[in-house]
Image (cartoon, grey):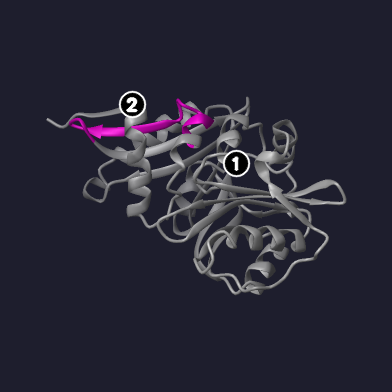
């Protein structure tokens, strides 16, 4: 008799999420798991069939009223048998009463609509080795870790619907990550983080006051891995970011739909040149 159980993922099981995302060719960051766990230790669920993991989902709670879904994967051998939807319901219960966001493959939009989600915009993944286009010389790049964390967290809050200090502190400081802040005329004008992935290096977030600031940050990060491709998830509603990716010679390779159950969060969309991660927002 088949026995399907849902449980919160333990620390030793978190690698499963990244491995399965890799199998789906989502190209997750190689060092994502630790900061992901810090965001919400209770927000990662595994569905086990007769003791073997067969389905996953993350349902991360931010603050009192926002949540984000990701890692919604059922293993190919058991798809269509109802295990995924059971996990989905458990995740949505974990996020009950919150405005919930997700980045889902475009062809699944209709299914998400049936669960109360609506499309806000699409994220377009751009990839390639950037050209040597130069940014303005009045922008100074500094190690993101050198910025007082309270200032960095307040800056991140401009672009994200809730405080995520535990996540952010690891995201900018892990040894495998490279964070840069852009300063102009003594003011913080941008922030970006690069992390390794199976294919190339992921950049996210990419916050910038202007296209030129974003260019400076991309140049600064890509210079640390010369000749290697970078991968950036760009909101298509930010036309300046789309233009910058084309200017850098990057090619679109993937698209997913940002959707919410409630209104679009009140954030500075013009300054979001790339999402932090499509798994956690």
Left/right of residue 100 with respect to residue 76 in the rendered view: right
Tell me: residue 248, above or below residue 254: below
Q: Nearer the viewer, mark 1 or mark 2?
A: 1
Quarter the C terminus occupies: top right
Q: Which residue shows up at 71% across the image and 65% down it?
A: 239
Classify 133 as above or below 197: below
Q: Are marks 1 and 2 in contact (CB under 8 Å)?
A: no
Residue occupying image coordinates x 53% and y 27%: 96
* Most foreground residue, 58 or 86: 58
Q: Nearer the viewer, residue 155 or 269?
A: 155
Identify residue for label 2. Answer: 7
Q: List x then y, in percent, for residue 177.
A: 54, 46
Picture coordinates of residue 211, whole percent (x, y): 75, 63
- Name the residue furthest right: 185
* Percent x, y of residue 17: 37, 41
Spatial CA span between label 1 and label 2: 30 Å
Expressed as whole percent of the image width and height from the top left, the position of residue 162 reads 66, 33
Mark closest to the chain's N terminus, 1 or 2: 2
| Residues shaded magenta | 36-52
> What residue is disc 1 on?
172
Horizontal side of residue 219 vs 125, given as left or right: right
For the residue pair 279 and 260, the one nearer the viewer reads as 279
* Residue 9 shows up from this direction: no
């Amino acid at each position: 008799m088949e026995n399907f159980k849902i449980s919160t993922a333990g620390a030793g099981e978190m690698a499963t999420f990244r491995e399965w995302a890799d199998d789906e060719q989502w190209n997750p960051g190689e060092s994502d798991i630790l900061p992901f766990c810090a965001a919400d230790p209770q927000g990662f669920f595994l569905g086990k069939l007769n003791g073997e993991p067969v389905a996953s989902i993350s349902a991360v709670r931010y603050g009192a009223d926002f949540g984000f879904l990701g890692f919604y994967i059922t293993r190919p051998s058991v798809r269509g048998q109802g295990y995924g939807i059971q996990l989905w319901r458990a995740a949505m219960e974990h996020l009950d009463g919150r405005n919930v966001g997700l980045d889902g493959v475009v062809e699944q939009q209709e299914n998400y609509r049936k669960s109360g989600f609506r499309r806000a915009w699409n994220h377009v993944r751009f990839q390639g080795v950037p050209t040597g286009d130069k940014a303005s010389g009045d922008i100074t790049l500094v190690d993101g870790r050198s910025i007082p964390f309270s200032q960095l967290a307040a800056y991140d809050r401009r672009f994200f619907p809730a405080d995520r200090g535990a996540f952010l502190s690891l995201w900018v400081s892990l040894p495998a990550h490279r964070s840069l802040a852009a300063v102009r005329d003594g003011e913080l004008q941008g922030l970006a983080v690069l992390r390794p992935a199976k294919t190339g290096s992921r950049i996210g977030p990419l916050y910038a006051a202007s296209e030129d600031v974003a260019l400076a940050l991309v140049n600064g990060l890509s210079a640390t891995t010369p000749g290697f491709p970078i991968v950036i998830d760009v909101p298509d509603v930010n036309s300046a970011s789309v233009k910058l990716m084309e200017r850098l010679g990057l090619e679109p390779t993937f698209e997913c739909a940002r959707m919410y159950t409630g209104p679009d969060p009140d954030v500075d969309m013009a300054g979001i040149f790339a999402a932090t991660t499509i798994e956690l927002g």
